[in-house]
Image (spheres, rainbow, N blue to C red):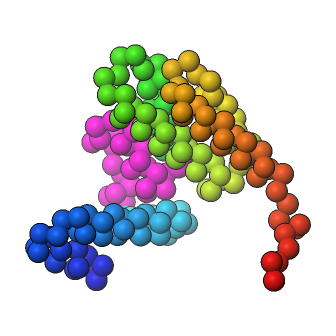
Amino acid sequence: SSEISPTISSIKSQNYIFAQSRLKAITALCVSCHSVLSDSISKKAFGDYINSEKRSRFDSDYAYANYLFLVRRFSESTSFFEMTIRDHLENAPLTQNAESRDHELYSSLRRVLSIYTKVTFNPDKSEAFLKKYSNHKNMPKPLNAMIDTWIKSLGRWKKFDPNKMTSPH
């Protein structure tokens, strides 16, 4: 609550840009902390109510996947992000708003990659996931280039040996 007071004051003084920036920062602060909680602590932190939301309460698989990601239900989140990816790729010509589709594709790919790298620490699964969608005929070219970059980075990560690290001092 101490973080939100200056934001409320900014809104009251019609300094909306500053207030919006503060809201983004507060949200990032909340997500960064809550996304690294252990499962048992996150259940206590979020409670049964927030963990029991159903897909029907959300506008899309993408929105539900983000909710599941936020409350640390990663395996379910991965499934819904993949549904979003497949849907956008299979229905690409039918999608009216390409910018929104591309954003959801990028975000979904990135979230699943994040789960496999930062949560489960599984570069092989990350690589297999990305290769499944690499060079798909409906994947936007800039996004396909990003996937190739991610795959190369995963290759370097798999070769990384922390025992060979030396101190710069």
The span shown in magenta is 48-76
Residue projecting furthest to the right: 164
Choose between 41 and 100: the one closer to the eye. 100
Choose between 45 and 132: the one closer to the eye. 132
* Residue drawn at 69 percent across, 35 percent down: 128
Choose between 74 and 123: the one closer to the eye. 123
* Image: 114 above or below 8: above
* Image: 115 above or below 165: above
* Residue drawn at 84 percent across, 51 percent down: 159
* Residue drawn at 16 percent across, 78 percent down: 9
* Residue drawn at 47 percent across, 43 percent down: 107
| Any part of residue 42 in sight | no
* Image: 38 above or below 153: below
Dominant secondary structure of the magenta stretch?
Answer: helix
Where's residue 6, x and y in %? 23, 79
Where's residue 22, x and y in %? 30, 70
Question: For this view, does 77 lie left or right of residue 153?
Answer: left
Reply yes or no: does residue 55 show up in magenta. yes
* Image: 137 above or below 60: above
Reply yes or no: does residue 158 show up in magenta. no
Where's residue 82, x and y in %? 51, 34
Where's residue 153, x and y in %? 71, 47
When asked about the image quadrant of residue 124, the answer is top right
